[in-house]
Each structure stands twice: as structure tokens, then as C-alpha cells.
Image (cartoon, grey):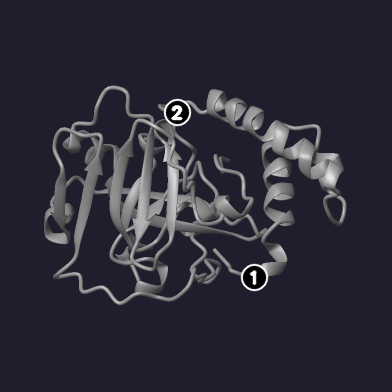
Amino acid sequence: MSTNPDSKLYLPRRRFLQISGLSSLGLVLSSCGMSLYDEVVFNATEPLNQNVEALLLNPYKLIPEFPASAIEPQALLINTFDFTPKIDPEKFFLKVDGDIKRPLRLSMAEIEKMPLTSMTIRHICVEGWSAIVQWAGIRLRDIVSLAKPSADVRYINFKSADGYYESWDIASALHPQTILAYQKNGQPLPVENGAPLRLASPIKLGYKQSKWITQVTLLKEKPKALGYWEDQGYEWFGGL
């Protein structure tokens, strides 16, 4: 996700409403900027938008994929949060903790032994660009299942090696096309795209798809720190 300050406040909110089509505020927010009144109204109605998005999410419905011939190798832009971390795959471990019965510390060798899922989907950035990409890795739901979460877990939090942080609702995390990817377009995932592990899913906007993930935390309560961009005004659910 770009750190361009000019796009930090207005575009994500306008873009979200244009994509979702869920709010009549779209006409108001499509102007050059938000007035104080618009800001207050948006903050008051944003939870409603999130609830509607959650209702529309079918956790079992698959999003149609693209053929391999549709892959756009040059279209996926490289955005960094702060810096590109250097991670030794041989020393890397994914930590899984939180409200679970079985804390995990998984090496890449252990992760790569799990069932591989491949999908060719459209990655959509809130800044207005998109790219058709083939991602492959393990379903996040398989990791969650191994961790044996409490029955009342509702959220999942992600921490990345570069300091980025993000949180999702558990239904989105358990969607069969939400994966922790370690391959891109049939090749090992490049470091600049988030190696050794990154989130990939056709049901979320790009800023929700954290790169360089090192820790996954399952939670009963919504975290106070929702996400790096969400804590600066972006919409939390970030669904498509």
C-alpha cells in the first residue's frame, strides 16, 4: 500500500463507496474533498456499511477466477509501508497465538508440507489500479484449524516484519480463497511482494493483504489497533 500522503484520507473512502455501492453518501464523497459535515456523516454511517458488507459475505461462495492466460505480470505495483525487510526463509517462523488451544510456531518447511492452494484472481488497490495475479500457498483456514480457536473467536490480527499491522473479521479469514501465499505466478514469491508469506484474497482490497507476515493472532474482541491505514481513517472491513 502506498504511503502517498495525498491519497491518505479521501480516495480510499470514495473508492470504497464506489466499489461497494452500499451507501448513498457516494455522491457526496465523490466531490474533491470532504467537508466537516461529510466527515461526521461518514463516521456515523461507516459501521452500518461494515455490517451490510458482513451480511453480504458468503463464507462458502467462491469468487470466479481467471485463466492463466489472463495473468498481468507487470501490472502488480510494488508498494512498501516503511521498508522492505530482509527475512531468512531458513530461520523464519510463523507465530500463531491468541484465544486458541494450540499455539503454533511453524517453519516454512512445515508450511510448505501443507496442502497447496493456487488461484488466479484480480488484486485491487484502493488507489485505483488492479492486476490479475496467480497466488499459491496455504489456506488461512487450515492454519486456524490447527490452532484450535475458542468458539467465540471473531477477529484475526496480523503483524508483519516491517511493522505493518492489520485485522480482519474471522469469516473473511476463513473464506476458502483467503490464503497465505508463498508463490506468485508459478514462481517463489519475490521479497518485494511479501516473501516469505503474505495474505492474498479476492474478497479484500489491497491494503488488507499484509506482506511479510510473521504473526497471526486470533481474538474474541476487535483489536484497538485496527490496522495501519484504518487507524488513519481507512474503512476497516475493506471488502469487495
* The one of 121 and 80 positioned closer to us in this rendering: 80
Task: Name the side, left or right, on which 11 lies relative to 88.
Answer: right
Q: Tell me if 218 is positioned left or right of 202 in this view.
A: left
Q: Which residue type does callout 1 highlight? A: Asn
The residue that label 2 is drawn on is 61
Q: Secondary structure at mark 2?
A: loop
Which residue is nearer to you in this view: 69 or 124? Answer: 124
Which element type, helix, strand or loop, lies under badge 1? loop
| Quadrant the N terminus occupies | bottom right
204 relative to 13 in the view: left or right = left
- Quadrant position of the C terminus in the picture: top right
Q: Is residue 117 above or below residue 163?
A: above
Image coordinates of residue 135 in percent, x first then y, are 38, 55
Q: State the residue at coordinates (41%, 56%).
A: 134
Q: Nearer the viewer, residue 186 or 46?
A: 46
Q: Is residue 123 above or below residue 192?
A: above
Residue 18 is marked as none
Q: Residues within 10 Å of mark 1 (few under 14, many from 20)?
A: few
Identify the residue at image location x=70%, y=57%.
9
Q: Position of residue 90 (x, y in %)?
A: 14, 70
Residue occupied by mark 1: 4
